[in-house]
Structures are given as structure tokens and as C-alpha cells.
Image (spheres, rainbow, N blue to C red):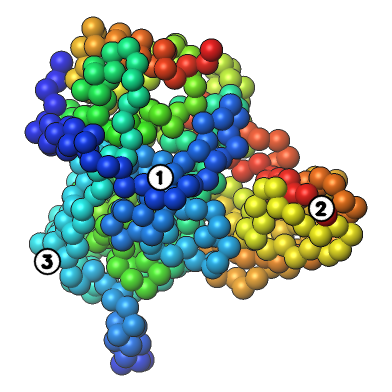
Amino acid sequence: MKAIAIAGYVLLGLMALPVPAISQAMDLPPDAAVFPDGPNVKTVTQNCLACHSADMVLDQPLLPRATWTAEITKMRNVYKAPIGDADAALIVDYLAATHAPP
Amino acid sequence: MSAPSRRAMLAQAGSVLALSAAPAIAATGPDFPFPGGNGARPLASDFPQKGAMVLQRSRPPLLETPFTDFDSSVFTPNDKFFVRWHWSVIPTEVNADSFRLKVHGQVDRELSLSISDLMKFKRVEIAAVNQCSGNSRGFFEPRIPGAQWGNGGMGNARWTGVRLSEVLDKAGVKSGAMAARFSGLDEPAVSDGPRFKKSLSIERARRPEVIIAYAMNGKKLPLLNGYPIRLIVPGWYSTYWIKMLSDIELLDAPDDNYWMKTAYLIPDTSHADMKPGQTGVTMVPINRMVPRSFITNLGAGARVKANAPAKLRGMAMGGDCGVAKVEVSGDGGQNWHDAKLGHDEGPYSFRQWTAALTMGPPGEASLAVRCTNTIGETQPDTPNWNPSGFMRNVVERLSVTLV
């Protein structure tokens, strides 16, 4: 029984490696998106891209200023993004100007 | 205020470089019909070990399976399997020889297991759906911030590995242990950010279907899907399926880390449903999945022959149990007809189905599909809502034109 199991295992191994026997490495592609122009875009780029690409933000629905304020607060308080008060306000201004309902 | 870690600085430097590089985006991707719009996404083919994927986010990678791929096979190919990471610091290389899985905390014997140590445990195999808690979040209304998934934040694979219970037994779980906490090789981009960790009760961790997988559809896991090993929790949402699993800690108290206590919570209500702004709702960690079903051989707006039988095809899942019944409707859910179920790959797998449905006269028609699982749960007619956009499983409807 054990021999059959081993034989089956080896057979499977011939078709495709079923085990992580060899190491693996990868190259991740560069960010695909950039923040479009808007007020304080430089501050946004400098801070937000430390942890995530711009499409994280650009793919969101249009959100009201209060929701963006809550998101930036979450990034700072929960995920410990090192964003100061002044920059946080500038980032919210950018999002409210470029990615909020009319 | 905290200083960004060296890794975060490197990541930032990398992203600045990226600004000048031409984005490697291929053909036009889907335009999801999300309420309020902004559903257009590119396809990306430049992620390692991945084919063309819907690009939701470059970094940390968030890649969605193009929905047409669910029509080809009951199992989702590894190179089309969805990808979701919380933090951007992901090892780009894993050495299979030096990799170790640590088991520690409330145990009699701490373990440090190599891949070959793990291979000495009994080999088991299970087919199971892996679905993000927030799959389909883009369809919630009102909309919710977060990963704006269409319906492709899920996949089905045959997982090969060893039972978690046997590994726990080897370590000897102490009688006072209350939870097993799992984490992988990924790290916060900011030094004091909360490392991604998830816990299961000892009872859940010991269930026979919970395994540590070293293969996926008969091949090693892609790095982006958790190579070299990944926790598999059949029937439960993907948040518990820790990728690049490297650490199991047995706790003597319930886990109060951020990812269990604050994030990934659902209202403890029927269908995890509540009203926007509703207060006083008891929240609990997300857990078991619920039934879903989809038509996969037709897309929205398809032209279908009127006054003739149409062949429909798709797949369904029971959640944390099997599929008992799939029904289809050609009139938006007024009349339902049983579909024929395909081969049963086990209770945690997708189940394919086929149906022949007679179409009405020329004009617009709404097709619908719904699944009932083996414990009698049927998909609801109305969508649920909760503040994180979790557990969507409303009956899917598809508008077609009869000609």
C-alpha cells in the first residue's frame, strides 16, 4: 500500500512538482498608476506611496470628505503611517477635491 | 510619531522610480457595473507566476480572477488564482531549505519544522474554495472603502498538505490553550504597524479538513498565493488562510490582536446584514462562508436566441457545506427550474451545473441563479449590507437581450 502511494507520488512528480522542493524568487512589477494632478499632489505622493500604490486610492468610489478624513485617520492611527497633522490635512484636501461626489 | 522602516523607505524609493517607468498594463479589462461607477480596471500580465489578472492594486498586490476563467474548469488555475496581501513587505524569495514553521506558546514542545519535516506527516488532499471576505464589495450600496472587488476575489483549488491537528499534536497543545494564532513571512511596511495575524479556536484548528498545504492543484504554490506553505481553512473566508505560514502560536487567552478584535468583524445578524449607521449591533469575527452561485457562460448584455432553449452553465458553492440544489430563472426570479449538478468534488469545492432554459419572446430578460446548500440555506433575494462590505451572497441576476 505504501509502495503504491510512493509510486503514485513519484508519477505525479514527473508531471508536475507537487512539493516545494526548490526555492522560488520573483520580481514584482512597478506601480501601474500615479496620482493625477490636484492640490497637494506632491504631499499625497510622498506620503501615501510609502505603503501602497496609487490605484488603491484611485479605484475607490467617490467618497465624501468625512469618509476620506476617517480613512486618513485610520492609516495614521491603526496602520501607523508616519503622517503629521499638517500633511494629513493636505491629503484630505486633495482627496476631497479630486475623488469626492460633486 | 513613528519613523518609517527601512523597508518602507525602500518601497517608497521603488515607487518613485515607478513614476518614470511606463506602466506595464495590457489590454482593456472589465468595467464592473458598481453603483456610482469607477468600475473600470486594467488587466495586468506582469505579475510573477500569474497570467492576465484584473489589476485592483499594484502594491500590495491585489489581483482579481477574470470572471470568464470560472467557466473553463471547476478548479481555478494557479496562474489565474486571485491574490490579496495586506502589507507591501512580502518576501520576493523563499529558500525551501532554510524555511521553518515555528510552533510555540502553550505547547509541551516547541517545534521548528522544515519542509521535509512537514512532508513526513500523512499527506492529505482537499478541494476547497478560497474566497476573500470582501469579495464583491464593489457592488455594495452605499459603497464602502476597501478593495473594490468584482466577483472574482475567489478561487477553487485542490490543496495538498498535512493536517494541522497532527502538527499540533506533535507539539502537544497544553490544556489551557484557547486559540491558535497564525502569521506568515509578510511584514508591515511601517515598523510599528500591526503584523497580519489571525486566530482559530483550538476546536476549529483541530478539525480534520484544516490543513497546511504545500501544493495547490498538484503544483507548488505561486509565491503570491503563499509559497511554500499556506493554511487552508475549508468553508471559512480567506482571511484565515495565512500565506507563507511561518508561525503558529498557541495562546492562553482569546486573541485580542487588531486583525481579530477590530478588523474583519461582521454583525452577528442574519446574513451579516444591518442598516448603514445602525448602532448597538454586536460584532463578531467573520467566520463561515455562505452559499453563492453564478452563470459563467454568458456575460451581462449577451444576445440570446428568443423562444428557444438556452444552455446555461455555471458554478455554485455551499459555503461551509455542500451544494444541495441550484435553480435558474429566465424571468428575474419569478419561476425557478432545477439545474443539473456536475461532479461532486467534495463539500468545500465549487460545484459546476448546467441547465437548459426556454427563453421568452424578443426583448430584455433577466436571468437569475440561486444555490441551496446541504443545511438548507438559500441565497437571499435582497443584498446584505454591513460597514466592511463582507459576505455578499445575494441571488445574482444577469440582463440579456433575447433576439
Q: Residue at x 34, y 16 (%)?
A: A38
Where is residue B24 shown, x and y percent of the image?
A: 31, 47
Seen in the picture, residue B336 relative to B387 is either above or below; the reply is below
Mark identifier at residue B97: 3
What separation in Å lies between label 1 and label 2 (alpha carbons)? 32 Å
- Residue B312 is drawn in which quadrant? bottom right
Q: Earlier in the sequence, mark 1 or mark 2?
A: 1
Q: Nearer the viewer, residue B101 or A61?
A: A61
The reply, left or right, for residue B2 in relation to residue B249 is left
The residue wearing badge 2 is B402
Q: Look at the image and tell me whether residue B175 can be seen.
A: no
Residue B322 is situated, as x and y percent measured from the top left of the image, at: 61, 61
B347 relative to A41 in the view: left or right: right
What's under tag 3, amino acid-wise? Asp
Q: Chain of mark 3?
A: B
Q: Is residue B67 visible?
A: yes
Subunit bearing disc 1: B
Mark 1 vs mark 2, foreground winner is 2
Q: Residues within 10 Å of mark 2 (few under 14, many from 20)?
A: many
- Disc 3 element: loop
| Quadrant in the picture for the N terminus of chain B | top left
Which residue has dot 1 on it? B55
Q: Residue at x 42, y 13 (%)?
A: A96
Let me know if marks 1 and 3 both belong to one chain: yes
Q: Answer above or below: position of B376 versus A77.
A: below
Location of the C terminus of chain B (image quadrant): bottom right
Disc number placed over residue B194 in the picture, else none: none
User: For the residue carrying disc 3, how many other residues have a C-alpha within 10 Å: few (<14), some (14-19), or many (20+)?
Assistant: few
* x then y, percent, for residue B63: 40, 47
